[in-house]
Image (spheres, grey):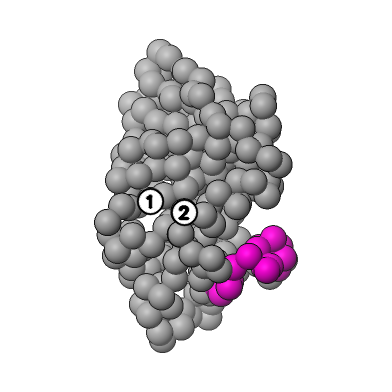
Amino acid sequence: MERRIFAIGGGSTPRGVSDYCLSLTARERPKVLFVPTASGDDLAQTLRVYDAYSGRADVRRVEFFPWPPSDLRELVLDSDLILVGGGNTANMLAVWRVHGFDELLREAYERGIVLAGSSAGMICWFEAGVTDSFGPELAGLRDGLGLLSGSACPHYDDEELRRPLYRRLVDHEGFPSGYAADSGVGLHFVDGALAEILTAREEATAYRVEPGSEDALAARLLDA
């Protein structure tokens, strides 16, 4: 069974990119589990997701405040797609680990349930990433879930400080090599390997970043 992760580079997700994400489930009307932990279960973010997927998917959500639901495992494993929202990646990972949600995500991944997300929902699947979780200044986070090897950096074209920090971390501070993604760009990984890059903007793409090098990767252009 293929294990699939769809990582999106932050910002608003174009309709074509979200359509592609849903298509990975191979379901006519997939069951989507939205996880807004990184935003503190922000209702406005949750409503935006419900609106965006209305009519195309059955969306449910899982919240961890004041505590997670008693049927958390059943809720996770009954999903076709688990979608993680943006926000504070470090706080999100801490909450997940306290409640064992990280292990449930691993189980879902091994069962072929599609894992996806934007910004914090991109970073979390990797070993490391660039985040503003620790304060107003960007920093490297080195304790991601590690379902994907290496590191990730979202918001590569819409936050001007992301690129120089990511390059410094990889070039000079022992940060693992990885992938950067422009806003709204989706990276589809199959069994841990990058399979395809999707974009709704001709000028937007993803990059492979290694010590001393940054290479733009070819992306397939979708309808916005």
**Between 149 and 92, the one nearer to me in the picture:** 149
> In the image, is residue 189 above or below residue 46?
above
**Residue identifier under label 2:** 24
What residue do we see at 63% from left, 65% from top?
Answer: 56
**Percent position of residue 34, x then y:** 55, 66
Residue range highlighted in magenta:
47-61
| Marks 2, 1: nearer the viewer | 2
In the image: residue 165, left or right of residue 100? right
Quadrant location, the C terminus: top right
* Marker disc for residue 4: 1
Instruction: Indicate the amino acid at tag 1.
Output: Arg
> In the image, is residue 177 above or below residue 135?
above
In the image: residue 153, left or right of residue 48? left
Instruction: Tell me the SS state at disc 1.
Output: strand
* Marker disc for residue 13: none
**Percent position of residue 46, x then y:** 65, 67
